[in-house]
Image (cartoon, rainbow, N blue to C red):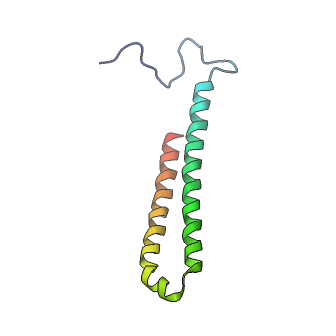
Amino acid sequence: MTTSNTKTEKSCPMGSDVGPLGQAEKLFKGFSIGLTHLARFNNLVTEIKEINSMIENMDSEEKDHLGDLVDEDLKDIEVRIVAYALLYQYEA
């Protein structure tokens, strides 16, 4: 059941979306999506840096025992990067 009060993302048929602020809501939505995804990517970059720092500080015995876990973490981060990129492409 639809009502006549629902908002749509299409341009207004009456022309109220013209002028300097006519597309402001759409512009704001684009900026907020971009900032959200930038924060997600920054978190992933921080995680990668932390993992790389841990790897540098490990001795060979620790690398032997924890190498598989570190590889799994890096693969998980890679999957999340691809997912965020696809989500951003879909939302933008």
Question: Which residue appears farthest toward the bottom when viewing the image?
Answer: 60
Whether residue 12 is situated above or below residue 73 in the rendered picture: above
Image location (x, y in percent) of residue 89:
52, 46
Quarter-of-image position of residue 29: top right
Quarter-of-image position of residue 76: bottom left
- At a point 57% along the width and 67% down the height, the residue shown is 50
Apparent side of residue 36 relative to residue 80 in the rendered image (left or right):
right
Image location (x, y in percent) of residue 32:
58, 37
- At a point 51% along the width and 57% down the height, the residue shown is 81
Apparent side of residue 69 relative to residue 29 in the rendered image (left or right):
left
Front-lying residue, 47 or 33: 47
- At a point 49% along the width and 63% down the height, the residue shown is 78
Whether residue 73 is situated above or below residue 32 in the rendered picture: below
Image location (x, y in percent) of residue 34:
59, 42
Front-lying residue, 39 or 83: 39
Whether residue 17 is situated above or below residue 79 in the rendered picture: above
Quadrant in the picture for the N terminus: top left
Image location (x, y in percent) of residue 75:
45, 67
Quadrant in the picture for the C terminus: top right
